Image (cartoon, rainbow, N blue to C red):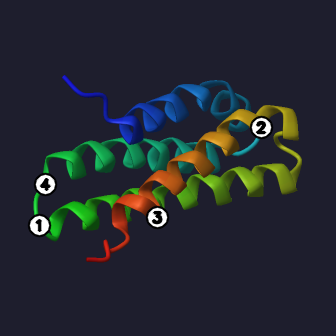
């Protein structure tokens, strides 16, 4: 069985967000829930896209990319409010950037 790296990174992101989400929940439950939902959406849509064919495939990856951007923005909001610090976010933000780079390659049209 082949490893789908985009899915593995999405799952790594979910794992890396456990502690930041728990810390964030102490300050802003709604924002913590938003990060959790968006991170789940990244992994679930990447997995779904891996099984789709035709135009459905890039559409699922595009949704995953939107959710990854949502995670990144929510974490930046948490940083701006002082709920989390840079050390809390270094690994999750690096994983979001890596995931977005992979998704960009999966979504963009291939030249002939």
Question: How far is disc 1 from disc 2 in space, using C-alphas?
Answer: 36 Å
Q: Residues within 10 Å of mark 4 (few under 14, many from 20)?
A: some
Kindly identify which numbered label has been placed on residue 77.
none
Q: Are marks 1 and 3 in contact (CB under 8 Å)?
A: no
Tell me the quarter of the picture where residue 106 sits: bottom left
Q: Earlier in the sequence, mark 3 or mark 2?
A: 3
Q: Are marks 4 and 1 in contact (CB under 8 Å)?
A: yes
Question: How far is disc 1 from disc 3 in space, using C-alphas?
Answer: 20 Å
Which residue is under mark 4? 52
Q: Residues within 10 Å of mark 3 (few under 14, many from 20)?
A: some
Tell me the quarter of the picture where residue 56 sits: bottom left
Nearer to me, 34 or 60: 60
Tell me the quarter of the picture where residue 11 sits: top left
User: Is residue 92 shown to the viewer in this render?
Assistant: yes
Regarding mark 4 in the picture, which secondary structure is present there?
Answer: loop
Kindly identify which numbered label has been placed on residue 90.
2
Which residue is under mark 1? 54
Q: Earlier in the sequence, mark 1 or mark 2?
A: 1
Q: Residues within 10 Å of mark 1 (few under 14, many from 20)?
A: few
Q: Earlier in the sequence, mark 2 or mark 4?
A: 4
Q: Choose mark 1 or mark 3, whichever is in front.
A: 1
Question: How far is disc 3 from disc 2 in space, using C-alphas?
Answer: 20 Å
Regarding mark 1 in the picture, which secondary structure is present there?
Answer: loop
Q: Residues within 10 Å of mark 2 (few under 14, many from 20)?
A: few
Does 7 sit above or below residue 64?
above
Does 93 sit above or below residue 11?
below
Q: Position of residue 29 (x, y in %)?
A: 63, 43
């Amino acid at each position: 069985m082949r490893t789908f790296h985009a899915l593995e990174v999405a799952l790594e992101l979910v794992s890396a967000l456990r502690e930041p989400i728990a810390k964030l929940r102490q300050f802003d439950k709604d924002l913590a829930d938003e990060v959790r939902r968006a991170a789940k959406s990244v992994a679930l849509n990447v997995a779904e896209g891996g099984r789709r064919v035709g135009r459905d495939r890039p559409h699922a990856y595009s949704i995953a990319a939107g959710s990854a951007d949502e995670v990144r923005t929510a974490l930046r909001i948490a940083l701006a409010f002082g709920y989390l610090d840079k050390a809390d976010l270094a690994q999750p933000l690096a994983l979001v950037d890596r995931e977005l780079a992979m998704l960009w390659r999966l979504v963009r049209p291939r030249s002939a």
